[in-house]
Structure formats: C-alpha cells, structure tokens
Image (cartoon, helix red, strand yellow):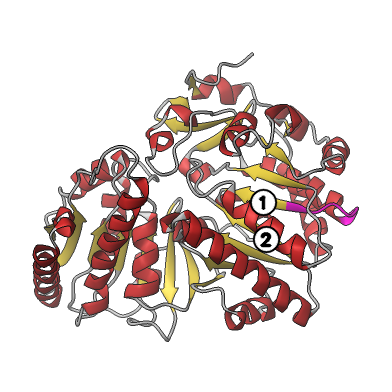
C-alpha cells in the first residue's frame, strides 16, 4: 500500500511504468474524435488553463452572444474565462447557473450537443465541488440531460503534476510530493489535506461522495491498452460518483479519452473537473513548438515591456528574486497593504502608474510587484480577505487600464491577476491563444476590441516553472 503522505523519488517511480506505442494510440484517438461531434465548452476558473493549446478562442464573458460565436466556430472547442477562483461562493454559484442556462439555450438553437469541462487548478485549489455540482444540477433541472459521473483528471505534465496509484503529486526537483503536503494544500481559501484523489473528493464533498464508491482508472490498465476494460468501468458509473484517472504522460490521457468516447457513444454522460491536459487531448489540439520573439513581438517599438507580479506563492517570490538579476528592468514595489487605508492606497496606486508610464515611454521595461507578505486578517476571515484581495486586484488592474503608453508586451504573474488584467485592464472580449512561450505558460493575442489590440499578453501561472523560468521568459522578449 502506497503511503499518500510520503514523497517518492521521481525516477524510481517513472522507471517502473511500462512504455506504450504512441503511434497506435494517436490513430485510435483520431478516429474516436472524428466521431465525437460535440462542442466542447471549457470553463476556466483563471486564464492559465489554455496552457496546453494554441489557435483556440477564449471568451471573457458567458453571454449568449459569446456562446453563439463559440458554437459557430470551426474548432470543436472554445474556452470561457470565468475567473471564479477570485469569486466568493455565492458569486461562483450565480455565474455557473447562468452559464448552464446559456449553454443549454445556445446548444438547442444550434442543434449541437455539448460537453462541459470545468478546468481547475492542477494543484487542486478552487471552488470544488461547488462548480461542477451547480453545472450538473442546473443542466439536469432545465433539460433531459442526466449525468452519470464526474471525471477527475488533474494531471498536467508541463507543471509536473502527476497522478500515480490514485495519489496526486507535485514534482519538486527529484521528488514527487503528495499534493496534500504542499503549500498549495494550505491555501487559506481552498485548502485540503488529502492527496489520494478518491479521499480528496470525499473530503471536499464533506462525505457526500465516498472514496470507496469511486472508479479508478489505473496506469497499469492504461499502459496495457485495456480499452474495453476501461470502457466497461465507465459504463458502470452511476449516481454522479467520481472517476479518478491516473496519468504521468499525455498518452495516458489519450488512451482514457478513447475509452471515454466509446462509453459516451454508448449513452453515458460525464461532467469533468480537470487540469489543462484533458482539454488538449479531447479538443484534438496538435503539438506546437514554443513561441519565438519574432512570433510574439509583431511591431517593434521604442517602448519597454510591462511585467506585473501578483501571485504570492513561494515559487513566484523565488522567480521574482531571479528576475531581479536582469539589469534592463526597473522594479517598482506596490504596497497593497495600504488597502486598509483608502486615501493612502489611492495615492500609492497613482504613484505606481505615473512612474511606470514614464519608464515605459523612455524605453525601460518595468516590473511591478505587490508587497510579498500576505495580508492576514486572522482566523475565520477568509471571505473578508477575499474581498480585500478583489480591491487589490482592481488596483493592480487599473495600472493597465489607465496606462496611456502601449508597452511592447505585457507579462502577468498569477492566475487571478492575469484574469483581471485581461478582462478589465485590457478589456478583452475575445482573445486567440497563440501558444506557449515556455511549457505551461500561455500567450494571448488580444482582440481588436481591446485596449491594446494584438498585443502579446503572457499569462504566467503562479505555480509553474523553475526559479529561472520567469527570468528566461522575459529575456526571450527582450533579445
């Protein structure tokens, strides 16, 4: 029995996993995807979920108009940025009820069936199980659709998140660390203790769904290409019980999706809570190399770039320290703790904007970072802290919103920060995912309606990359 609280040496674990002929799998997958014929609607709780795809649309609202455009696209899949990780529970519920209603309306109008994927954090943070529960209940109440189960698949290779023996791991250098033992599990808003995904679902649902009732898709079964066996496992799922998928590489997701589509063609219906890997596979998105500076900087200018660092996770702070080694960047600390003193906070925001504008205009790249210490109001103050964080995020967003000079590019560090800057600061309604500048770090090309049309907007998740990755990303943009 594997201990779900002990870290494991990564190489020892990976060396024991059998290999498989990926060419055979790709042919089988292609055939199944051809027969799928459903629009895939991905709800992204922050803008980092497009970190595995390219040439895919992201809409920043869930209006009927935006959904109609998504359903009309040739692509089988599009993303809706909900930014719900920055919402309260009440706001999250309200948004997901409306999304469900609008998706049903547009699906009926277009006579096109759909799949909804709730793309959440690969380190298991977010409004779970609230989001998928609301989606399920609203869709079932308003239509003839009934969901048999929910697939949980947080694997995300680019971020070193792996599920092995039903335990979800975050790789840290040479070791696989159970997710429940990481800093992410101690999140003040979305914390948890379990790393075994069946137990995690039981914990998060307060015992409504049991680990013992969960269906587990093992790596052994996937690597032995037991497609019929896995399909049969899925056919037996009922009562919205959970399906945990083990995965250490994309081929595992591909084999699972082959079985999944077979089960769906047999009449089964699933809800999905996943990391970014599932969307790439089920959306049939091809591999693409990392983006180059020539692809990212379409118009050369004399202006500097803009980097905004909002995330407070340890990895971000380490990456910021490495970034400081770049002598071509001017650093500005934004004292967001002044949010407790409105007049001082306004003056601080004005200072940051004015200083940034002058530097960018003179050709200097600017890195604005929020004060590194978290604002801690004490025990049982999570909702109050979340509301203050919204005010802080609005102030950070206003830096971009009020900027009078167009930077040569914008890098945003942290999911919620990136979302607010994209939707409110840059006023994006629809963006195209260009691809990735580094593994797991997506780039938007903003739409014509945005404040800076066609600018490269680099969305850098708070919990992705090594300590050098932020520095390396910015160096690519400044070659």
> In the rendered image, which quarter contains the C terminus?
bottom left
Which secondary structure lies at badge 1? strand
Give percent across and percent down for residue 138: 69, 62
Residue at point 59%, 28% (across, down): 196
Count of number-bearing discs = 2
Relative placement, left or right, of 398 versus 247 is left
The chief SS type of the magenta part is: loop
Where residue 104 appears, x then y in whole percent?
Answer: 72, 72
Which residue is drawn at the image coordinates 70% and 52% (left, top)? 271
Which residue carries the number 1 mark? 272
Question: Which x, y percent locates residue 410?
Answer: 29, 68
| Res. 280 in view | no
Question: Observer-nearest residue: 248 or 46?
Answer: 46
Give the magenta-colored segment's residue range. 265-270
Give percent across and percent down for residue 379: 31, 37
* Residue 99 magenta: no
Query: CB under 8 Å between callouts 1 and 2?
Result: yes
At a point 57% along the width and 33% down the height, the residue shown is 203
Specify the farthest residue to the right.
266
Q: Residue furthest front?
A: 380
- State whether residue 426 is above or below residue 214: below
Sequence-wise first label, 1 or 2: 2
Q: Which mark is residue 372?
A: none
Q: CA distance from mark 1 to mark 2?
A: 7 Å
Q: Is residue 44 left or right of residue 100?
A: left
Above/below status of 478 relative to 176: below
Residue 311 appears in the figure: yes
């Amino acid at each position: 029995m594997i201990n779900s609280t002990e870290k494991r040496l990564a190489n020892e674990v990976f060396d024991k996993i059998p290999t498989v002929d990926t060419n055979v799998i790709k042919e089988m997958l292609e055939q199944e995807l051809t027969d799928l014929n459903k629009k895939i609607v991905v709800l992204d709780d922050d803008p980092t979920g497009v970190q595995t795809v390219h040439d895919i649309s992201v809409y920043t609202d869930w209006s009927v108009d935006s959904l109609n455009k998504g359903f009309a696209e040739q692509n089988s899949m599009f993303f809706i940025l909900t930014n719900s990780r920055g919402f309260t529970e009440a706001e999250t519920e309200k948004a997901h009820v409306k999304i469900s209603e609008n998706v049903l309306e547009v699906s009926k109008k277009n006579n096109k069936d759909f799949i909804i994927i709730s793309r959440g954090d690969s380190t298991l943070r977010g409004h779970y199980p609230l989001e998928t529960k609301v989606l399920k209940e609203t869709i079932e109440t308003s239509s003839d659709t009934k969901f048999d189960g929910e697939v949980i698949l947080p694997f995300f290779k680019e971020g070193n998140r792996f599920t092995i023996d039903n335990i979800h791991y975050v790789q840290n250098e040479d070791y696989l660390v159970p997710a429940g033992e990481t800093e992410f599990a101690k999140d003040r808003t979305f914390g948890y203790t379990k790393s075994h995904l069946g137990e995690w679902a039981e914990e998060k649902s307060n015992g409504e769904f049991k680990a013992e009732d969960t269906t587990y898709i093992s790596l052994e079964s996937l690597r032995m290409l037991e497609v019929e066996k896995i399909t049969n496992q899925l056919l037996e799922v009922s009562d919205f019980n959970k399906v945990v998928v083990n995965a250490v590489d994309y081929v595992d997701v591909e084999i699972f999706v082959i079985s999944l589509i077979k089960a769906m063609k047999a009449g089964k219906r699933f809800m999905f809570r996943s990391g970014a890997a599932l969307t790439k596979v089920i959306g049939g998105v091809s591999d693409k190399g990392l983006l180059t500076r020539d692809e990212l900087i379409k118009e050369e200018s004399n202006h500097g770039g803009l980097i905004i660092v909002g995330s407070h996770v340890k990895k971000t702070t380490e990456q910021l320290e490495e970034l400081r080694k770049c002598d071509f960047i001017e650093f500005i600390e934004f004292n967001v703790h002044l949010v407790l003193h409105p007049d001082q906070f306004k003056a601080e925001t004005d200072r940051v904007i004015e200083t940034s504008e002058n530097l960018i205009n003179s050709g200097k790249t600017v890195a604005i970072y929020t004060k590194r210490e978290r604002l801690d109001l004490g025990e049982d103050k999570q909702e109050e802290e979340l509301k203050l964080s919204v005010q802080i995020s609005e102030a950070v967003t206003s830096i971009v919103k009020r900027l009078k000079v167009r930077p040569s590019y914008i890098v945003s560090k942290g999911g919620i920060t990136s979302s607010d800057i994209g939707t409110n600061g840059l006023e994006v309604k629809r963006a195209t995912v260009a691809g990735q500048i580094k593994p797991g770090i997506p780039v938007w090309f903003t739409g014509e309606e945005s404040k800076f049309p066609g600018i490269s907007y680099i969305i850098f998740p708070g919990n992705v990359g090594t300590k050098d990755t932020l520095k390396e990303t910015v160096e690519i943009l400044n070659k």
